[in-house]
Amino acid sequence: MAEPMKIRAQMQGDTADIKVLMNHIMETGLRKDAKTGQPIPAHHIQSVNVTVGGKVVLDAQWGYAVAKNPFLGFKVKGAKAGDKVVINWVDNKGDKRTDEAAIS
Amino acid sequence: MNQLRRTFLKSTGAAGTVALAVAAGLLKPGQVLAAEWNKSAFEAKNIADAMKGVNAAGAAKSADILIKAPEIAENGAVVPVEVTSKIAATSDIVIFVDENVNPMIADFTFSNGAEGYVSTRIKMAKTSNVTVVVKAGGKSYMASKEVKVTIGGCGG
């Protein structure tokens, strides 16, 4: 099971500034094992879904080249302090992780 | 890997099915994106095919897309990229690295008040243009910015 995400969600005026740090190896599938010379299979997050206050605000699909331990920052207008931010990701092997935080 | 076989699989497999479904009006492009990982676009080997895969071929150049990325990235494995779209009703931001083996990096779809802004970190194999496609009101727009890479970040 993957490590928890770090989520920071703060109001700036009428906009929530949300920053997320995920824990994932994000293997591209292009690298080779230095010892065996065998390709290392791809293992990366494929989809990310974010809701704020129960409404979907961001739906993302990721390919092979989002950097390891992905960072994601976005802004949501009309959100309020106290709204719950729920973030989900699913990777290409079916591993998943859900974390939540309240906007401060 | 047998290149011919890959090409054959790609052209007859997932890409064909999705394209057919879109053409037949069974699925709107947006729904395809939301429902299923866009395999054909992510596995495309060049920027033109990747852009076709997200229905953004022939996107118009726009000065309202701001790409913030370093001029020179010392480490291609972690290149911070920040995209701001000033285009009204921006629904999607799609990020590509033209020279990567698989140019398409990520597709972000916004709704319910999320602004046309995203900040993330990507991998770049070598010096390349970072191309961003923005979708707004059923139209596609694009912008590019070159990032010089001193050490590639995609292995191989």
Image: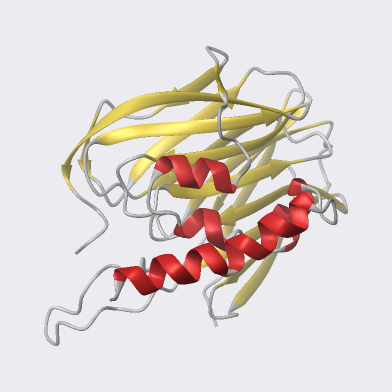
Q: Quadrant of residue B91?
A: top right
Kindly give the residue lying farthest to the bottom in the view shown: A36
Q: Is residue B15 left or right of residue B97?
A: right
Q: Is residue A83 left or right of residue B11?
A: right
Specify whether B50 is left or right of B114: left
Classify residue A8 as left or right of residue B96: right
Q: Position of residue B1 (x, y in %)?
A: 28, 76
Q: Foreground: A35 or B96?
A: B96
Q: Quadrant of the N terminus of chain A?
A: bottom right
Picture quarter with the C terminus of chain A: top right
Question: Residue A72: x percent and y percent?
Answer: 54, 47
- Report whether residue A101 is seen: no
Residue occupying the point 13% across, 78% down = A34
Horizontal and vertical percent position of residue B145: 37, 25
Q: Looking at this view, is B124 or B36 the one in front? A: B36
In the rendering, at what x and y percent does residue B153 appear?
Answer: 25, 53
Q: Nearer the viewer, residue A87 or B3?
A: B3
Image height of B143 relative to A35, above or below? above
The number of discs equals 0
